[in-house]
Image (cartoon, coloured by chain):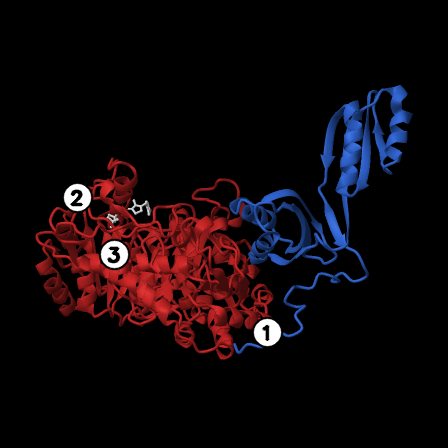
Amino acid sequence: MKKTGAQIVWECLVREGVDTVFGYPGGAILPIYDALIDYPVHHVLVRHEQGAAHAADGYARASGRVGVALGTSGPGATNLVTGIATAMLDSIPVVFITGQVPSKVLGTDAFQEADIVGITMPITKHNVLVTRIEDLAPALVEAFQIARSGRPGPVLVDVCKDVQQATIDLRWPEAVDSTRRRALPQLKRSDLKKAAELIAGAERPVILAGHGVIESGATAALAAFAEKTGTPVALTLLGLGGFPRSHPLCLGMMGMHGEAYVNTAIQEADLLLAFGMRFDDRVTGNLKNYASGAKKIHVEIDVSEIGKNVPVDLGLVGDLKQVLEALLPSIEEKAHEPWMARIEEGRHDTRSRDIVHRESGDALYAAHVINDIWRTTKGGAVVVSDVGQHQMFEAQYYPHEAPRTLLTSGGLGTMGFALPAAIGAKFARPDAEVWVVAGDGGFQMTQCELATLMQEKLDIKIAIIDNGFLGMVRQWQEFFYDKRYAATPLLSPDFVKLAGAYGLPAHRVDARADVIPTVERVRSEAGPALIHFVVQAEEAVYPMVPAGADLHAMIRRPHESPPEKAHASRAKGEAEVAA
Amino acid sequence: MKHTLIASVQDQPGVLVRVMGMFRRRAFNVESLTVGHSETPGVSRMTFVVDTSRISSRIVEANLRKLVPVFDVHDVTHLPTVSRELALIRVRCAEGERSQVNDLISIFRARIVDVATDTVIVEITGDPEKVDGLVELLRPRGIVEMVRTGKVAMTRGASARRGLAHEHDADADPLELAS
Ligand SMILES: Cc1ncc(C[n+]2csc(CCOP(=O)(O)OP(=O)(O)O)c2C)c(N)n1
């Protein structure tokens, strides 16, 4: 049957099971938009292409399915770039389709021509420029396969306008060669045996569980493994939810803002089992002194990650779930009581310093807000956090029990991610309670998507944690730049009025007593709502491993500090550095 | 240390940019790179010489394999190989010195391929060390211009695949996984 290139795009999306796409039209992609009307795919018009990219990303993170975003040539395509890089660094399967100038004028600096394939080469898993109609269907089929296979990632297909308009007899290509070639190597029995021996010999093991647990659907396998071997589990930021936080073996988050006892356990371990994580600098601190007494087993789907940052004693290449299931029968049942008792001591010390046990007085702490949202939602929400202090408070004070309940930009740390990503997440999981947690800075980067949210009538609750600063940067200035607050104080609009302009119900909260009632109220009302939380201006996220410092050299939250005006006593000299 | 990697890649526009972009992005150091057709239409062959003092060749190889148009990569550093490089060297040579130069370069099985009044062009093919040797010998005479192709390599023996089996292919006892 003869189809136009534009029709082929939609035929392909329908065949891939895509129900929703996020995009923004323009001249070079108009034929594709014209054909859209005839296909059962819902198009969400964003207000900026970055929003489309994050929404498609949020859709993928929330569901595990491939997200799709569309943009026109030139500025439309370049506006996608931040979102593409965000998906790349977090290994999120998203297919980007961009219009391109007609093939005849390629390379002539034609109107709205930008070499988006050249621009996005280093930030996509793969990308391709389609200049001939016969290449279109294979390129799209391959794009989806590449995006979701192996270690997932974004793929961009740039389609010349004349290709969209040309017609051809549509025939679907067979399974695409490039992914068949990329079959994973088989596990060796000898390696599994070696792993079992290392595990059997360990007295102080720690599992480091990352995003791979979630991508591989390995939550149950991980729990079975941890329980059988009695091994505590530390999580990366993107691993949160991959192992229930309430599990007795769950330590919580590791790394720069991980709890002190977690990082200490990693430093004191004699065996690290790295499962689907990549030893990012935010989790290792100074590599020279990283867990130097520990043997290391690294299970990873991407061979190029094994030995990249940290030398390992054994690398197992494969899908985490399959590797864990293969490993399980050959390992012995164990418990590590003295080790767990030692970790528990540290956990106790952390609890005693914890800000959630602190009186709030007149102050409203971001950590309390997050913890109260957790309490009120009973931990059952999908939380989409932005980037900054509130993101770390979310990770610390909203314990996640299930995979895909925390969506956040970890690798790239993209401010402005939360609101559009939440829009995508809500489409992927319409029945989930979706919360945005954003700072006053990041929220303003993509707040234009409030209009998208209203146009689509989405029930998303938004918590803006307003500290009047670019908080996380201010914290670095406080700790490392003598409190010289260059360009971090931030004027914001009246968010309640702003929401009003969009027709969005909104509330302002500046006292602890009002947090839970307001959260309860917006939960009881169907439809979106925004809560503007005005919190302590100069609060810091503790503990903190300064960038490049040893993982155990954490700046700890001081034990005693008066509840009111806490920041006044938090001068640099008073921050304790734990040895 | 230097490692020699051979890759077969899809012969399509932009492959070279993609491959070199990966090297640049990862801050891997490439000493030389050659690209040309292979025995199979649609497949190009690349030979890399990579400086592995800062990064293991295994990681370079793994990153190459991640690129979609890359079919296959092999590190042939420790395998018996034939490796060759071609160089053209324009060297100063007065008319009276030609036979002297000719004698010198014939030891390297090099030859003069062009003659001008006070220079000649010398062509040499050989492994890179041999080319280095000739370059050093000619340098005192005055090298006016030089071009080297970079190394190409092929493993010795009868079969194209010999010695190139993947590590995991070679495992006698692989484990079958349910998928
Ligand atoms: C797009 C982008 N620009 C700059 C940064 C650097 N940065 C990291 S955190 C941060 C401050 C965020 O401030 P805010 O959104 O108010 O959140 P808070 O830290 O106060 O919770 C900045 C500027 C970034 N991560 N992303």
Q: Secondary structure at mark 3?
A: helix
For badge 2, the amino acid type reads Ser
Residue A97 to residue A476: above or below: below
For badge 3, the amino acid type reads Phe
Question: Residue B49: x percent and y percent?
Answer: 66, 46
* Nearest to viewer (mark 2 / mark 1): 2
Q: Residue at x 54, y 57 (%)?
A: A304
Most foreground residue, A473 or B172: B172
> Is residue A242 at all visible to an observer of this figure?
no
Q: Residue at x 49, y 61 (%)?
A: A296
Question: Chain B appears in which tint?
Answer: blue
**Gap in Å between the C-alphas at discs 2 and 3?**
20 Å
**Gap in Å between the C-alphas at discs 2 and 1?**
58 Å
* Nearest to viewer (mark 3 / mark 1): 1
Question: Residue A77: x percent and y percent?
Answer: 41, 49
Question: Going by the image, does A382 lie left or right of B19?
Answer: left
Q: Which residue is mark 3?
A: A393
Q: Secondary structure at mark 1?
A: helix
Question: Going by the image, does A105 lie left or right of A260?
Answer: right
Most foreground residue, A547 or A115: A547
Pointer 3 chain: A
Q: Which residue is mark 2?
A: A569
Question: Going by the image, does A175 lie left or right of A527?
Answer: right
